[in-house]
Amino acid sequence: MKEKISIWLNNLIGKGAGRSFKRDFIVFAFFLFLSFIFWYLNTLRKEIEIDVRYPVRFINPPRDRIIANELPQKLIFNIKGRGFSIIRLKISGDRAPVIIDFSKVNYRRMPNTGQLEYYIVSSGLLPNIKKQLNPDFQIISIKPDTLFVVFEKKSSTPSSDKISSGTGKSTGYLISSEMFPSDFEFNIERKQ
């Protein structure tokens, strides 16, 4: 036994020690990586719980109203399901947004506010969202738990609609008599 240990030490100290150590390290790293892959695949077979950021789109505000505040573009869904279905969801970067329809949502007015401020409890959105997503997993909760919405009345003047739509083109001129003294003459030609 002592002879085998001394031979091994001589080989380790000798010229071939570096080459042998590199080969042993490469073999060890390969099998470590292989065991990690098997462990990960085994984990994906089990049920896991994870948070996923998912895009949303809001449609159909109340009649003659516009949304005045900025609503979140993504909500965080806490989902539970098999690892394979969840990893498929996370990998697919091209997700169609979940549609939240204001005509089908129960939103409530904020108490003690003079404006058109409302709130939506996110747990009330779960049945509609579950219909739109893959049935392979279960949505446990949604973050944020409350969405705040401020509505404003649509203005009925066409010029303000064109300006607010961001076209950047004006359709007419606004000249105030206070801008120029009464003895000042000017001509305005409109180019077509």
Image (spheres, helix red, strand yellow):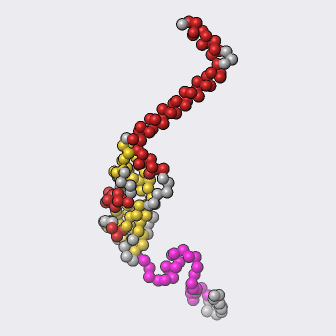
Q: Residue furthest right?
A: 15
Residue at point 39%, 77% (across, down)? 64
Q: Is residue 126 visible?
A: yes
For the record, the magenta segment spans 153-180
Residue at point 43%, 64% (across, down)? 57
Residue at point 37%, 51% (across, down)? 136
Q: Is residue 122 visible?
A: no
Residue at point 63%, 16% (across, down)? 12
Q: Is residue 10 left or right of residue 38?
A: right
Vertical placement of 14 versus 111: above or below? Answer: above
Quadrant into which the C terminus falls: bottom right
Quarter of the image where one finds residue 132:
bottom left
Nearer to us in this view, 50 or 120:
50
Residue 148 horizontal/vertical position (percent): 38, 63
Vertical placement of 117 versus 18: above or below? Answer: below
Quarter of the image where one finds residue 1:
top right
Vertical placement of 114 versus 8: above or below? Answer: below
Residue 141 horizontal/vertical position (percent): 35, 52
Quarter of the image where one finds residue 59:
bottom left
Residue 46 horizontal/vertical position (percent): 37, 41
Residue 9 horizontal/vertical position (percent): 61, 12
Vertical placement of 22 versus 78: above or below? Answer: above
